[in-house]
């Protein structure tokens, strides 16, 4: 069972139209996110605002895999725990985090992951890490590719507060990718394929 605040999400969903207006979020393809069943939301990553934006537009809670350092920050750490985030040890394959994500997928939850692992430079993409390939290989969960543009303008690296109203944010959600026969595929190969689908949106 996922550890998250159902009441917190209920309250968040009531006020999120305000956040969509404040951040000028434009969405295309939202119908491609399944309303139930385990799935992986895989998105490019250029700003710390990205997880918030995706949960703001999603029709269901997305539990993100996030670096464990964030959980040690006062207030933010509490908030992301209540949002169901999964702490991940960076710079090495965190088997414990992958097992938890796999279990949640089997239970029908939606897991969010940024294949690049780190924020990319403005308007750019990084090479994906193999972790998403491993997760897909073990669970066969459908992957919904998402491309976000504009968060690096609204909340760039080094900023302490978003630049509200100044820049729009665009989110494009692609059709689910199904991996039914990938036993012989390398984890990195799967990750590369997913990243190319994100870039093509």
Image: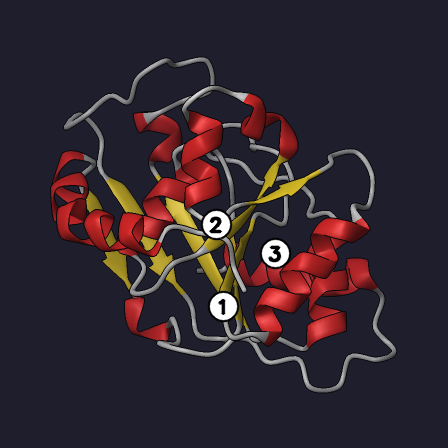
Of the two numbered discs 2 and 3 on the same chain, state the one appearing first in sequence.
Answer: 2
Seen in the image, is 146 located left or right of residue 165? right
Quadrant where the image shows the N terminus: bottom right
Secondary structure of residue under mark 2: loop
Which residue lies at the image location 32% right of the left edge and 59% below the top edge?
58
- Camera-near label (2 vs 3) is 2
The residues tagged by marks 1 and 3 sit, at their Cα atoms, a distance apart of 22 Å
Q: Position of residue 15 (x, y in %)?
A: 14, 46
Q: Position of residue 30 (x, y in %)?
A: 30, 67
For label 1, the residue is: 109
Whole-Å distance between the Cαs marked 1 and 2?
A: 10 Å
The residue carrying pointer 1 sits among few (fewer than 14), some (14 to 19) or many (20 or more) residues within 10 Å by Cα, namely many
Residue 195: mark? 3
Precedes in sequence: disc 1 or disc 3:
1
Residue identifier under label 2: 84
Among the two numbered marks 1 and 2 on one chain, the one whose residue lies closer to the N terminus: 2
Q: Can you tell which of label 1 and label 3 is closer to the viewer? A: 1
**Residue 59 visible, this orientation:** yes
Q: Looking at the figure, which quarter contains the C terminus?
A: bottom left
Quadrant in which residue 146 is drawn: bottom left
Q: What is the C-alpha distance between the residues marked 2 and 3?
A: 24 Å
SS at circle 3: helix
152 or 75: nearer the viewer: 75
Q: Residue at x 82, y 46 (%)?
A: 93
């Amino acid at each position: 069972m996922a550890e998250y605040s159902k009441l917190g999400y209920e309250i968040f969903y009531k006020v999120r139209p305000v956040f969509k207006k404040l951040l000028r979020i434009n969405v295309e393809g939202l119908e491609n996110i399944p309303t139930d069943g385990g799935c992986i939301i895989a998105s490019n990553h250029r700003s710390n605002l990205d997880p918030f934006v995706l949960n703001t537009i999603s029709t269901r809670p997305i539990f993100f895999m996030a670096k464990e350092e964030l959980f040690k920050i006062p207030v933010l750490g509490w908030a992301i725990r209540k949002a169901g985030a999964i702490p991940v040890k960076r710079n090495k394959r965190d088997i414990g985090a992958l097992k938890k994500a796999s279990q949640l997928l089997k239970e029908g939850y939606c897991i969010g992951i940024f294949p690049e692992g780190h924020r990319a430079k403005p308007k750019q993409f990084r090479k994906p890490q193999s972790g998403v390939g491993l997760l897909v290989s073990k669970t066969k969960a459908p992957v919904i590719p998402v491309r976000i543009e504009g968060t690096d303008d609204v909340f760039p690296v080094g900023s302490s507060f978003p630049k509200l109203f100044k820049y729009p944010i665009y989110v494009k959600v692609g059709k689910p990718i199904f991996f039914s026969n990938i036993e012989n595929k390398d984890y990195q190969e799967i990750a590369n394929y997913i990243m190319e689908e994100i870039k093509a949106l």
